[in-house]
Image (cartoon, grey):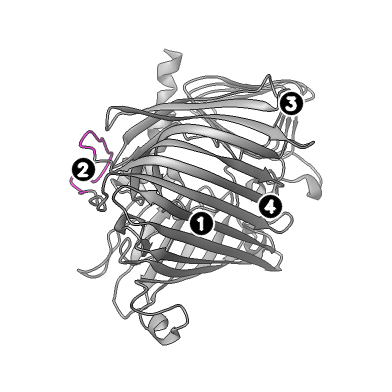
Amino acid sequence: MRKISRLFPLISLFVALAAGQEVDTTSTDSVAMEAIEPIDQLRTASEETKFFGDYTIGLGETSYNNVRIFAGDLFVGGTVEGQIIVVGGDVMLESTAVIKGRIVAIGGTIHRKEGAVITGKVVEANIREGINISEEPVGEAEKFDYYFEYREEKLKRRTTLIHPDINWFVYNRNEGFLFTPINWRWDDRGRSSFRLSLSLGYRFGQRQPAGKLTLDKAFLKKRNFALFASAFRESRTDDSFRLPSDENSLAGLFARQDFYDRWDEEGFEAGAGLDLVWLRLKGKYRAAEVDSISISDRLWEVFHGDRLFRPNMRISSDYIRSFAGTVAVRSRDFDALSSGAGLYLMGEKVIDANTTEVFSRSTAMVSANLELAGGIVIRSRVIGGTSAGVLPEYRYFGIGGLGSVTAHPYKSQSGDRMIQMNAELIFLPDFLDDDWLIALFADAGHAWMNREHGFTDFNAVTKNTLTAIGIGIGDEDMDWRFNISRPLDGRNVWQTNLRFNMHF
């Protein structure tokens, strides 16, 4: 009975989220609502989410994540640097527990033994006692930082460069529900320089397994240089800069939308990686069978059941061999809300294929931020893409849509060249002296074929550039944000979207 009762706060939460996704248009040619969020390539995720089960942070352990438990209890004996949200369960804090962020219990109770330390706000909401909010009398330097998730774990929590974790829940128009419960690593509990990694899941939409198996060998004192080899069957996309996979999954589940074009690859790769935190390098040889993934008809959605998914791009079956590499550089402590800069380069050169002509494709992204004053930040991003040879249609660059240029249809421009610019001025809660933020943003971009004009033909580039401006309002933790935008091409079109992160 207790487990059943835990479901009611979850149901209420999802209903509230769904109710916020509405379309507001003012003309017949307005753009349908798009939902969810873009990616920050130089920032790793900081969320630890558990469903229908208890979770323990033991004595001596430190979690740098935001801990979110749904329909389960949380036991803490160690330290939590992030915030805690428990829905449909209780929070038990031992005397050794240290909570440096906010702690929220919805539909449950916070039990705290003497000696437990909480330096942020405490929020309890349950049927018997209503909503109680308290705050510990701590010094100014110890108070909860509303954007700690961007300022803290950057150098503390590093996902592997060689075999990154795969989201256990992925939902899209091609794979349907991709469930990946196995993300295992074996390295003699960190004592061995060899590591065997396995990610294994199942595509319910295609009724096919998918996953990756990797063996790597680390070198140097800090084990930050590695040689690796992998076998895989996985989907691939060039659109990951637009939205992170988990938010794209929510868009499919709640709004029947998919902001990725993807294809299937099955084969092997081998290469090397270097991770110095501020500098990351990775190079590999890859050989894979390439094919399309059909749109699944075994999909379930909360809303917009009559909305048709966008068709696949044209992809020919092929066996492709290529070299690929990535370079990521950033200034010290650079993150989404502090002054600094970051550079991300990605390139691929196809050396042989059965049916496709050889080609090369490269992308560069520069991010630069500036803190004008306390609580006022300018963020900017510039992305450029180019290619050589005959680029297949499914590898074209695309401009338009979320994570690109808002208030324009998804990939309304495409080609083998592109340039995109995004900027926003954010007034943070510190400046507004409130629990929310305001952002003013502008987007611009253009994609075209090389035969039309070059990068230096500024008249042609500016004449065909898509532009848009907008305003966003979000909560202090940046868990959600509501944006309103419109194009600058003279059309009377307004677009609204609900995001669960920043604009880009």
- The Cα–Cα distance between marks 4 and 1, rounded to whole angstroms, is 16 Å
Q: Residue at x 33, y 33 (%)?
A: 177
Classify residue 143 as left or right of residue 454: right
Dot 1 corresponds to which residue? 347
Say whether marks 4 and 3 touch (CB < 8 Å): no
Mark nearer the viewer, 3 or 2: 2
Image x and y of residue 415, in percent: 34, 67
Image x and y of residue 96, in percent: 77, 23
Classify residue 81 as left or right of residue 436: right
Q: Residue at x 42, y 69 (%)?
A: 418
Return the disc, 2 or 4, that comes first in the chain's sequence. 4
Q: Amino acid at mark 2?
A: Gly
Indicate whether residue 299 is drawn in magenta: yes
Q: Residue at x 74, y 38 (%)?
A: 119
Q: Is residue 103 visible?
A: no
Dot 4 corresponds to which residue? 279
